[in-house]
Image (spheres, rainbow, N blue to C red):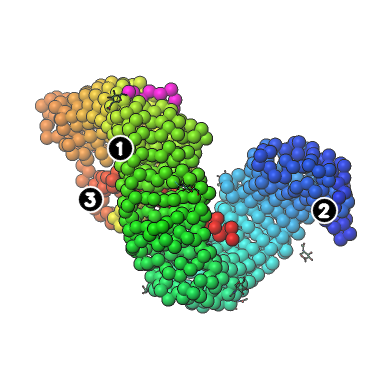
Amino acid sequence: MLSNLLLLICILTSSSIFTTHSYNNKCLRHQETLLLQLKHELIFFPSSSTKLVRWNESAECCLWHGVECDASGHVVSLQLDEEDISGVIGDLSSLFRFKYLKKLNLAYNGFNDAIPKGIGNLTCLTHLNLSHAGFVGQVPSEISSLTRLASLDISNEFGNTLSLEHPNLEMLVQNLTELRELYLDGVNITSSDERRKWSHIELSHLPNLTSLSMAGCSLYGPLPTSFWQLHSLSILRLDRNNLSAVALDDLFTNFPSLTTLTLRECSLKCSIPSTFGNLTELIHVDLSYNSLIGSLPSTLFEGLSNLVYINLWRNSFSGNIPQSLFALPSLLYLFLGYNQFNGTFQLDNFQSLPNLTSLDLSGNSLSVDTGNVNSSSYGGLKLKGLGLNSCNLSSFPDFVKHNMDLKYLDLSNNSIAGEVPSWVWGKRLGYLNLSFNLLTNLQKPYHIPASLESISLESNQIKGELQLSIPLDSQLWSLSLANNSFGGSIPISFCNATNLQNLDMSRNKLSGSIPRCLLENISDLDLSRNNISGNIPDTFPMVCSLYYLDLNNNALEGKIPKSIGSCMNLGYMNVGNNMINDTFPCMLPSTLLVLVLHSNRFHGDLRCNKNWPSLKILDVSSNHFSGSLESIDFSSWTSMMRGYLDGEFERKLDVALIMKGQMVELYKIWEDFSTIDLSSNSFYGKLPNAIGDLTSLHQLNLSHNALDGSIPKSFGRLSNLESLDLSVNQLAGQIPEELGGLTFLSVLNLSYNKFVGAIPIGRQIQTFTADSFEGNSGLCGFPLSINCSNTNVPPPGYNETGEERKEIEWEYVCAAVGYVVGVGSIVWLLLFCRGFREKYFGKIEEVVEGMFIARDMRRRRARRAAAAMNRVIRRQ
Ligand SMILES: *[C@@H]1O[C@H](CO)[C@@H](O)[C@H](O)[C@H]1NC(C)=O
Ligand SMILES: *[C@@H]1O[C@H](CO)[C@@H](O)[C@H](O)[C@H]1NC(C)=O
Ligand SMILES: *[C@@H]1O[C@H](CO)[C@@H](O)[C@H](O)[C@H]1NC(C)=O
Ligand SMILES: *[C@@H]1O[C@H](CO)[C@@H](O)[C@H](O)[C@H]1NC(C)=O
Ligand SMILES: *[C@@H]1O[C@H](CO)[C@@H](O)[C@H](O)[C@H]1NC(C)=O
Ligand SMILES: *[C@@H]1O[C@H](CO)[C@@H](O)[C@H](O)[C@H]1NC(C)=O
Ligand SMILES: *[C@@H]1O[C@H](CO)[C@@H](O)[C@H](O)[C@H]1NC(C)=O
Ligand SMILES: *[C@@H]1O[C@H](CO)[C@@H](O)[C@H](O)[C@H]1NC(C)=O
Ligand SMILES: *[C@@H]1O[C@H](CO)[C@@H](O)[C@H](O)[C@H]1NC(C)=O
Ligand SMILES: *[C@@H]1O[C@H](CO)[C@@H](O)[C@H](O)[C@H]1NC(C)=O
């Protein structure tokens, strides 16, 4: 009854006599009180709030920021987005007493609770936006009673924390017949069981729906037939679902009014059907990150004269770039990068599109000919972003010189030789990538414009001393000069770049010391493979954002600076191959994933009063460390025990390796990769039993120490171990039979110890050669040539029949399947084929540094570059 009455109020107040004005001056006292109560109830950071914090400033509450009233002074709209509100809104909150509220926006806040059921009391609502507000759990059924809703946004793309199972999507919208906009991105729309049947979802009772957005909802299967009745649909976003079973023809013929269609990352595998031409209203189309194939008919875009945005990035389109693209008068954004388009492409084709803003042809098999572009007419071009990565360019495109608007320029991976012309710096550039060319010097003068945010000159042949002048208001946050021949010292002008977060000057010929100011803001710093000397400055700030520090292969001395202890994000630290003379840096934050101290002058033991629970790789080899291994608390190295994986690290391991000409994703194998290398120190004492608990361990190297005692049987639990090196110690006793069960083991070195008895017979041990066991005068049995029969020691695990198990069958099988590719078979081969395994992991060791460090940095940079490009685009 009451709710019917309220509904009546809504209907009355929304009729034309009561129009909504934000500028009327009739703040009702009780509405003001309610607003102040609401402000009092909400938890928010005054420093990030722009609206709530200013309520109360004037007597006229209808003029408060984010508040709108109707003519009679009732609050009808509350826009509380991006106010950094956290905590819980109780069902009894004052919020639900604004009976006249029509528009409520709580987007982009930090609630961490279910959507409050009290929302159901706001029966007048026509616009409800709860997107990215931190709400979690099941969407309450109360929303389904808000029958006047025209727009509902509960998108939640970062984290999939909202779900729509009970009620499910159909129940939720059953009575919301006036809906025009429905945004459900990232919401788990049904239980995984039902999701398979999303094609039965009934939405046909929403005849007025114009916008439907369901990106990242884990949908799969064919398109629901009920969708076909959504004749008014104008905006359809289904990115990041598995739509491989959806016939594009259905989409293209049933929604003639589509203006926006985005199907990014939808596992589409077909070619584009000619019915694409039916979408004559189309303005914005995004089909990027799929596996779409075939050549695009030259007439494909004929008649689609409204197109403004076309994104076909990262598909497998081939053949020529269709001519009909150059007759789209409204086209502003064209992204064709990372396909297999081929042939020679004349850039002057685009002269028919003088308003084109962003163009990307990168990563195809195109030879782009920039020569015919008429500089003077192109001078009028509005191009703001140009991506010509891998386009077979041999010189700087001349027309760019005349384009004053350019903000994004990627000319990487070409064969551009000679000098970087001065005019490049004279622009309003934000992003400049000239990496992987044949550039040899920088034409003088070169002034970095303040607008530049990201520069890469990586992997060229640039020589000479770096004399960058960086203005004080520089926006620079990423700079890579890696893999050139820059000499001299690190320019002090970096101190002007107060936004600099990523600096990669690795693989150059730099000398001198590290400027103190350099460490003050940095988050990624790579100075490896230079000749930098002196101490690492003790100038890490109290609020330190350092994540990645690579100073490997220099001539640094002194100690690890104490201030690095405040870098609470530090994940990767490599100071290997220097002359640092210090004890173990116990102050390092416990966030560390990778720590390399290899080949320095570290001394003392490894005992600290803290843990590194995330540590995956520890290399302290070739130092002067000593102490008993038994004093190390291996049980605290939980990451090596459980295969714990940090999200950032996961991305770090998102590496690929080219092997036998095939790309093999190492991702799965590397997932819980971990290494301990304590070799070439002076550790002594027994091997602790607890090492056997480090079950995620892939590599263990304790060689060249002074360890004694025997190998604990617990080593048999190291079921992921690929490499075990205990050589050159004083270890004694028999080799435990359990080692034979380590099926992944491809490197075993027990040489130069005091082991005795028979080498155990195991699935694995016989695959190693005599080198693995030499220098142990008491050992006998295969693969050594010393026969055990004289010694009367029964070989552990030896079959009574005396028959040695042969690996020969496996060799046979391996040869037979040797040419099979694909990850599944790779894993299989790794399990059973020794030769293959050795090559495989041998390769890993060889590339570990290059890949793990350099390539990953490059990838992260590429990601950031993409983000930068997006920013540039969005700003326009
Ligand atoms: C919401 O409505 C229910 C009943 O419809 C009522 O009991 C409750 O007090 C209302 N909540 C507020 C905050 O008005
Ligand atoms: C949503 O689905 C994802 C993937 O199936 C799952 O990990 C997540 O826990 C679900 N969230 C909720 C709130 O059910
Ligand atoms: C929709 O409205 C009908 C009729 O008022 C009602 O019976 C039904 O329960 C409502 N559905 C939902 C999901 O609220
Ligand atoms: C759809 O919109 C039309 C025109 O705006 C309107 O007359 C009709 O009532 C709407 N239908 C529903 C179910 O709300
Ligand atoms: C859709 O496109 C196909 C092929 O181009 C054409 O035969 C058909 O008539 C078009 N349908 C409509 C409704 O435009
Ligand atoms: C280019 O933009 C200008 C101004 O925005 C507009 O007047 C002109 O018609 C556009 N040209 C084309 C070919 O669309
Ligand atoms: C482009 O690729 C197609 C096959 O996808 C091939 O037939 C054609 O010869 C290639 N053209 C050039 C110029 O390489
Ligand atoms: C730092 O910036 C100021 C002002 O832009 C400039 O005069 C000075 O030369 C810069 N310093 C260096 C070392 O580049
Ligand atoms: C390390 O420094 C100490 C003095 O601080 C010195 O006695 C020692 O010789 C140094 N060790 C090495 C290997 O240089
Ligand atoms: C020895 O090998 C034979 C044949 O492979 C098998 O039947 C027997 O069980 C084995 N004995 C032991 C002790 O493993």
For the residues marked 2 and 3, what is the alpha-carbon distance in whole angstroms? Answer: 85 Å
Q: Which residues are magenta?
A: 604-614
Q: Identify the residue at horizontal 25%, vertical 39% (top origin).
A: 747
Answer with mark 3 or mark 1, whichever residue precedes in sequence.
1
Residue placed most toward the observer, 687 or 346: 346
Residue placed most toward the observer, 605 or 411: 411
Task: Label 3, secondary structure: give it.
Answer: helix
For the residues marked 2 and 1, what is the alpha-carbon distance in whole angstroms? Answer: 68 Å
Say which amino acid is labelled 2.
Tyr
Magenta stretch, overall SS: loop
Task: Label 1, secondary structure: give it.
Answer: strand
Q: Is residue 150 above or below residue 774?
A: below
Task: Label 2, secondary structure: give it.
Answer: loop
Residue 796 visible in the shown view: no
Does 783 appear in magenta?
Answer: no
Label 3 lies in ligand 10 vicinity (Cβ under 8 Å): no
Determine which residue is flagged by label 2. Answer: 23
Q: Is residue 194 left or right of residue 549?
A: right
Q: Identify the residue at horizontal 82%, vertical 48% (top origin).
A: 62
Local crowd size for mark 3, using a 10 Å CA cut-off: few (<14), some (14–19), many (≥20):
few
Determine which residue is flagged by label 3. Answer: 812
Q: Any mark on residue 555, and which?
A: 1
